[in-house]
Image (cartoon, grey):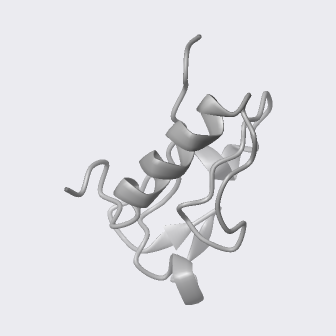
Amino acid sequence: MVECGSPSWDGYVTNAIAGLQNRCAATGNPNSPTYYQSADTFLPTQLIVTDYNSWNGVVNPGGAFSAESGNRCAMACS
């Protein structure tokens, strides 16, 4: 299942659930788009969704982020 236009969505959801179940612990590889960490502030570049490959405001990012199309903010409520 690919949600939100990201091929990494399923991996992110898995990490986010694990992190939330462990008191919001950062979960996964920080060099991967599937990484989960809680935050209370965001940069503008972390909230941009595009219809082309981008990550954190960078067009055509390399490596693990090359198939992403921007950043989405997912909020968990407790």
What percent of the width, then of the height, locates residue 70?
49, 59
> Which quadrant of the view contains residue 68?
bottom left
Visible residue check, residue 62: no
Q: Looking at this view, is 55 or 17 the one in front? A: 17
Quadrant of the frame with the N terminus: bottom left
Does residue 73 sit above or below 10 in this rendering? above
**Residue under the image location 72 percent in, 66 percent down:** 30
Q: Residue furthest left?
A: 1
Question: How many numbered discs?
Answer: 0
Report the side of 11 relative to 21 (left or right).
left
Report the side of 68 relative to 46 (left or right).
left
Does residue 24 sit above or below 29 in this rendering? above
**Residue under the image location 69 percent in, 74 percent down:** 31
**Residue under the image location 48 percent in, 53 percent down:** 12
Q: Residue furthest bottom?
A: 63
**Residue under the image location 64 percent in, 49 percent down:** 46
Visible residue check, residue 44: yes
Q: Looking at this view, is 24 or 67 the one in front? A: 24
Q: Looking at this view, is 13 or 72 the one in front? A: 13
Quadrant of the frame with the C terminus: top right
> Which quadrant of the view contains residue 56?
bottom right
What percent of the width, then of the height, locates residue 44?
69, 44
Report the side of 20 relative to 34 (left or right).
right
Q: Residue furthest top?
A: 78
